[in-house]
Image: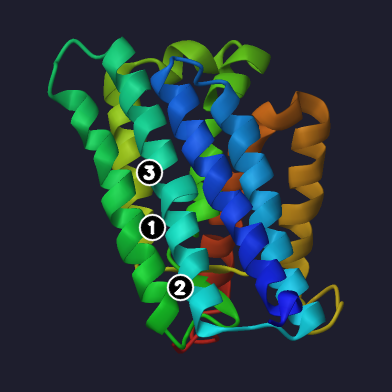
């Protein structure tokens, strides 16, 4: 048995385990823990690919396992979190079920990513980890930046945000991939802006700054698409 080939899959399973623990915590009403679980899972999601490259241990099973783990952690977990938040602030018993659009759209996003050859240099639609990080760090944002709390806890506003991000998951919109072919300032200006301004946001607000980072990521991607039309031809 080649143990080396199983190491990346073991790390992917840690991502999956983190997702299941996160769902349990959210169901128990400990929604603030979702942010830490998703951050840990995102680390595992990064490491499994890195280790697979270092060990030359890529496999079709690993690719499929990665998507299945991501579906639980970055699809189902934020769905349940948003459901619990909508349940708390909504006067309608039906409204919270809008949250499950995040899960179904995440499944579509992950399935498309596995077969879409256009996504080597840019993502098409919002990546599921970014979507999950946005929603799961909202409690920390409301705690760190009090003026955001009455806005985000408005049920209409929160429903609109949920629907918008569910749409973005499968939207045919090119978004920046933080992959560098070179380190040229001009060729990577939007990547650098996202990274620098994102780092400043997190340093000032803590992990509650992550929603600002995701918004900056989307806005700079749209700006790049607008200022360089035709550069992306996928």
Question: At which x and y percent is residue 44?
Answer: 68, 54
Q: Earlier in the sequence, mark 3 or mark 2?
A: 2
Note whether 67 is above or below 141 in the view shown: below
* Residue beneath the point at 50% across and 13% down: 149
Question: At which x and y percent is residue 216?
Answer: 62, 48
Q: Which residue is mark 2?
A: 64
Q: Residues within 10 Å of mark 3 (few under 14, many from 20)?
A: many
Whether residue 179 is visible, yes or no, is: no
Which numbered disc, 1 or 2, marks the residue closer to the eye? 2
Note whether 197 is above or below 227 in the view shown: above
Question: At which x and y percent is residue 9?
Answer: 61, 67
Tag 1–tag 2 contact (CB < 8 Å): no
Note whether 95 is above or below 21 in the view shown: above
Q: Secondary structure under badge 2? A: helix
Image quarter where the C terminus lies is: bottom left
Q: Which mark is residue 76?
A: 3
* Residue beneath the point at 76% across and 71% down: 51
Q: What is the C-alpha distance between the residues marked 3 and 2?
A: 17 Å
Q: What is the C-alpha distance between the residues marked 1 and 2?
A: 19 Å
Q: Which quarter of the figure has residue 13? A: bottom right
What coloring was used for the rendering?
rainbow
Left or right? Give the position of 99 relative to 184.
left
Q: Which quarter of the figure has residue 133? A: top right
Q: Which residue is mark 1?
A: 169
């Amino acid at each position: 048995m080649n143990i080396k080939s199983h190491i990346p899959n073991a790390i992917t399973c840690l991502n999956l385990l983190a997702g299941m623990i996160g769902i349990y915590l959210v169901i128990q009403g400990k929604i603030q823990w979702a942010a830490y679980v998703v951050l840990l899972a995102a680390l595992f999601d990064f490491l499994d690919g890195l280790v697979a490259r270092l060990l030359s241990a890529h496999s079709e099973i690993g690719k499929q396992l990665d998507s299945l783990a991501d579906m639980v952690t970055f699809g189902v977990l934020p769905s349940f979190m948003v459901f619990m938040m909508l349940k708390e602030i909504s006067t309608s018993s039906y409204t919270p079920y809008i949250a499950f659009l995040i899960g179904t759209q995440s499944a579509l996003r992950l399935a498309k990513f596995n077969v879409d050859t256009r996504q080597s240099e840019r993502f098409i639609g919002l990546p599921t980890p970014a979507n999950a990080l946005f929603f799961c760090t909202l409690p920390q944002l409301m705690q760190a930046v009090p003026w955001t709390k009455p806005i985000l806890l408005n049920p209409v506003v929160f429903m609109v945000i949920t629907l918008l991000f569910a749409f973005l998951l499968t939207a045919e919109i090119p978004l920046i991939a933080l992959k560098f072919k070179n380190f040229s300032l001009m060729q990577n200006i939007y990547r650098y802006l996202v990274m620098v301004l994102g780092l400043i946001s997190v340093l000032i607000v803590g992990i509650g700054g992550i929603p600002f980072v995701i918004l900056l990521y989307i806005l700079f991607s749209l700006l790049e698409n607008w200022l360089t039309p035709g550069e992306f031809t996928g």
